[in-house]
Image (cartoon, rainbow, N blue to C red):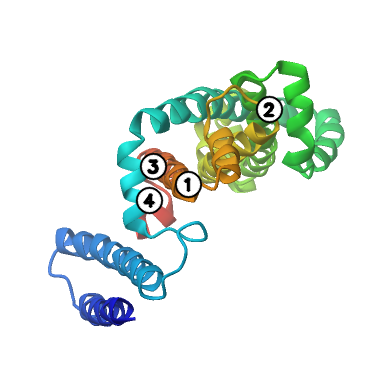
Amino acid sequence: MSVFLLAVLFWLAAWAFNEWLVRRQPESRTQARLIGIAVPLIFGVTLLVLWEGAVRGFEVPFVLLPPPSAIWERLINSLPILWADFRQTFLKAVLAGYVLGCGSGFLVAILIDRSPFLQRGLLPLGNFVSALPVIGVAPIMVMWFGFDWPSKAAVVIIMTFFPMLVNTVQGLTAASSMERDLMRTYAAGYWQTLFKLRLPAAGPFIFNALKINSTLALIGAIVAEFFGTPIVGMGFRISTEVGRMNIDMVWAEIAVAALAGSVFYGVVALVERAATFWHPSIRAG
């Protein structure tokens, strides 16, 4: 219990320090960025300390909830296994499915924009397919494409295709009628208007789909591995180690997946800031 009390005291002290930080008026942009990084970092550390103190203080069995120190020890001692799982799931299935799913969704959105027939026929079908649960699609993909990473990439393609399709189609209508009329007065054709006006205006919508898909892709690949995979992969490791009651290894895989997903999302967000720097939401940020 004394360990838990010490953790609570640490949490209160960190809370007070965070309150002091957020009430400060930064004198420069660099100082504001440092405060913006420090506040969530300190908050995250306090959660880990509370977690450690609660498990140690109340003597919670490690098979139910291991402390962060045990998870860290397992993570450090299992780096080769974790790297092999990361390479199988993320570098192969997630990235391949993400690129193919988002790319094909973008291209089909351009075709739909050119064809009212496709717009009326494909969009309702897309909304229907996007509502299919991954646990229903994953076994079918495993039967079609085998147990290796291509079947997981196929699941990722299905999960990322329609968010990109719907967002891109919606984004292509973002340009106002006055702007489109101005392009027509310049005698601009469809493709000139598309590349110089409508696609830039659709940029926030497209990047919104890319950010959503960065998390959906990882979730889809991990869940798909529960239904058949070689003896490697994040989903395979999680399901196997749960059966062996190695919960610390399960949490280590979850930590790697969370870190990979966060970094992936952050990279897409940085590319968005560079590509849509002109947008009011980016300028305001």
At label 1, counting other C-alpha atoms closer than 10 Å, the crowd grade (few under 14, some 14-19, many 20 or more) is some
Within the image, what quadrant is residue 182 found in? top right
What residue lies at 16% left-to-right and 58% top-to-bottom? 30
What residue lies at 54% left-to-right and 46% top-to-bottom? 208
Q: Is residue 277 left or right of residue 116?
A: left
Find out whether the residues at labels 1 and 2 contact each other: C-beta distance under 8 Å.
no
Helix, strand or loop under label 4: helix
Q: State the image coordinates of residue 63 (x, y, percent, origin top left).
A: 50, 56
What residue lies at 71% left-to-right and 17% top-to-bottom? 145
At label 4, counting other C-alpha atoms closer than 10 Å, the crowd grade (few under 14, some 14-19, many 20 or more) is many
Q: Amino acid at mark 1?
A: Ile
Helix, strand or loop under label 2: loop
Find out whether the residues at labels 2 and 3 contact each other: C-beta distance under 8 Å.
no
Instruction: Read off the residue under disc 1.
Output: 254
Instruction: Read off the residue under disc 4.
Output: 71
Find out whether the residues at labels 4 and 3 contact each other: C-beta distance under 8 Å.
no
Disc 2 to disc 3, C-alpha distance: 27 Å
For marks 2 and 3 on the same chain, the one whose residue lies earlier in the sequence: 2
Disc 3 to disc 1, C-alpha distance: 14 Å
Disc 1 to disc 2, C-alpha distance: 19 Å
Q: Which mark is residue 263?
A: 3
Instruction: Read off the residue under disc 2.
Output: 228
Q: Quadrant of the C terminus?
A: bottom left
For marks 1 and 2 on the same chain, the one whose residue lies earlier in the sequence: 2
At label 3, counting other C-alpha atoms closer than 10 Å, the crowd grade (few under 14, some 14-19, many 20 or more) is few
Q: Amino acid at mark 4?
A: Ile
For marks 1 and 4 on the same chain, the one whose residue lies earlier in the sequence: 4
Helix, strand or loop under label 1: helix
For marks 4 and 2 on the same chain, the one whose residue lies earlier in the sequence: 4
Disc 1 to disc 4, C-alpha distance: 10 Å
Q: Amino acid at mark 3?
A: Val
Q: Residue furthest left?
A: 27
